[in-house]
Image (cartoon, grey):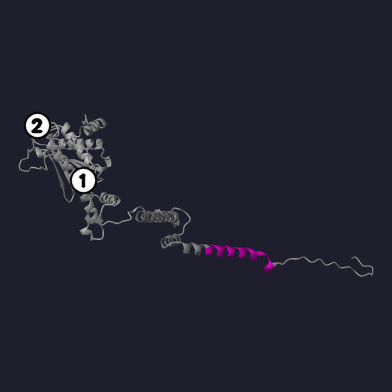
Amino acid sequence: MPQGPDGNTIIIIKKVSGHGGAHGGAWKVAYADFVTSMMALFMVLWLISASTESERELIAEYFRQPGLFSFGGGRSPIQMQEQGLLEKKQAEDQQNIKKDKTQEESFVDEHILAPKMEYSPEQIQAAQTQAFQEAAQRINESIAQSKIDNNGVLENIEVKIDAQGMHIDIMDSKKISMFELGRDILLPEAQAALVVVAMLIKDLPNPIDIEGHTDSTKFVKSISNRYDNWYLASDRANIARKVFLQAGIQPERIHRIVGYADTQPKDVENLSSPSNRRITITLSYDKQAGIQKLENLKAENVTKINDLPANNIVLEVNQNTKSIPSILDETFLTETSSANSFEDFR
């Protein structure tokens, strides 16, 4: 053994650092597992607090039937009930978006687009009746002028206003017919009458129904199997529609074309009477048309009493109505004929 200068033996002691046994590094792994578990716990608690009752039921159903394979055990919440959590959440988001959009549109309709002044149903009805009466007056004036000049164009027209609207009957007479016998060929006099009626009602925004009617005269047997009064009435009503369109009536205003054959005679005692062969033009009551009329009256500074109860409203109209071309005005007829071709309606 080595010795020092004094003759003593030198002893060297080497210490090895570190711990063994229970004081090793295994505790770090356990601590990491604990922290991971706590993180997972708080994530689950957060998801539960953020989910709805139905979503929690789906999660609970999944844990009641745990399984590894798709054909056995529980399904994930995304696979359940045809619509899982993700799809269900997306659907709810879409519903909320639609709800918000509907509320915005409702606000715009009520506060921006809606008329500043609200009108009662009685006021709207009264305004439309007022407009119908003005139109009826213009038609009657044209009829009176036609009778004075004895041209027979508007000889047999009747105007009636009832709870459904304004009805204009253009009928055959003993002297004049609207169409060729048993055909849908419109004659010039009836064409001119339809043009004038169209001009007189063109400014009214109300929806229009056009009806065709015939008398009880039947077609001969060789023809009746292929063509009868039902076809004839419908075809004649459609011809009237074409005249109205070419005279300036907007297509969207015409709501219905119908043929009644001889089922609604005007002269019930004489089913073959010429008055049963007619075209009926009906302008129906319409809420928007009534509001428009009231707004027009307001814009024209027409006196109307709004302070009275709705059922006692009084509407006063100006006497300065628009001048409508008379059926006898040759210039009007010439311009209309040149601007709109009525030569062939078949």
Q: Which residues are magenta?
A: 21-42
Vertically, is 274 above or below 50? above
Instruction: Locate residue 308: give its quadrant.
Output: bottom left
SS assignment at label 1: strand
Q: Relative to 210, is 263 on the left or the right?
A: left
Please say whether residue 112 is one of the residues in the magenta stretch. Answer: no
For label 1, the residue is 283
For label 2, the residue is 221
Q: Relative to 133, is 101 on the left or the right?
A: right
Residue nearest the viewer, comparing 26 with 318: 318
Which quadrant is home to the C terminus? Answer: top left
The tag earlier along the polypeptide, 2 or 1, is 2
Residue 80 visible: no
Residue nearest the viewer, comparing 30 with 222: 222
SS assignment at label 2: helix
What residue lies at 20% left-to-right and 47% top-to-bottom?
134
Task: List x then y, in percent, for residue 113.
Answer: 35, 52
Q: Please, what is the three-letter code of the amino acid marked with disc 2?
A: Lys
Residue nearest the viewer, comparing 93 with 189: 189
Q: Are marks 2 and 1 in contact (CB under 8 Å)?
A: no
Q: Relative to 240, is 14 on the left or the right?
A: right
Task: List x then y, in percent, for residue 72.
Answer: 44, 55
Task: List x then y, in percent, for residue 8.
Answer: 92, 70
Q: Residues within 10 Å of mark 1 (few under 14, many from 20)?
A: many
Instruction: Locate residue 176: give its quadrant.
Output: top left
Q: How many marks?
A: 2
CA distance for labels 2 and 1 = 37 Å
The kind of secondary structure the magenta stretch mainly shows is: helix
Circle 2 or circle 1, nearest the eye: 1
Which quadrant is home to the N terminus? Answer: bottom right
What residue lies at 47% left-to-right and 57% top-to-bottom?
67
Q: Please, what is the three-letter code of the amino acid marked with disc 1?
A: Leu
